[in-house]
Image (cartoon, rainbow, N blue to C red):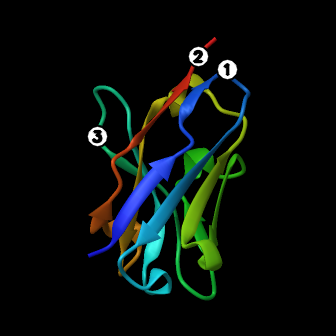
Amino acid sequence: QLQLVESGGGFVQPGGSLRLSCAASGRTFSRYHMGWFRQAPGKEREFVAGINWIPSLPYYIDPVKGRFTISRDGAKNTVYLQMNSLSVEDTAVYYCAAAQRSLRQGGEFWGQGTQVTVSS
């Protein structure tokens, strides 16, 4: 089993930035695609960003391209999501996820979720 522990959520003004992190343990980190989903009130949970093992190639949904950057640190067994130019539409619970295939197909393992609130 792969365990995922998230941190970094919080409250930010529109145009601001946040950096989420997710620490993984229990399995070989490099064997998994790692990334993030989000779920806003009244909406379906959606994939946001993912990154595969070596080579670490990122992939994103169109609404966050150019604003969000996903990265991973194998030595720390941690994946990050740098979120810039945040808007109110980004408000959601963000979940770290892992899978053996592209996260566009869904996650297999999940973190507990961290709240991101963008508001003036």
The crowding category of the residue bearing disc 3, from other C-alpha atoms within 10 Å (few below 14, some 14 to 19, many at least 20), is few
Question: How far across and down, in percent of the image, does residue 36 sit?
Answer: 46, 55
Q: CA distance from mark 1 to mark 2?
A: 5 Å
Quadrant assignment, res 3: bottom left
Question: How far across and down, in percent of the image, does residue 33 sit?
Answer: 45, 75
Q: Which residue is mark 2?
A: 119
Instruction: Indicate whether 17 appears above or below 56.
Output: above
Quadrant assignment, res 55: bottom right
Q: Which mark is residue 13?
A: 1
Nearer the viewer's eye, disc 1 or disc 3? 1
Q: Are marks 1 and 2 in contact (CB under 8 Å)?
A: yes
Q: Nearer the viewer, residue 25 or 99?
A: 25
Name the residue located 57 percent from the left edge and 42 percent from the top edge.
8
Q: Residue pushed farthest top?
A: 120
Question: How far across and down, in percent of the image, does residue 39 sit?
Answer: 36, 39
Q: Is residue 45 left or right of residue 50?
A: left
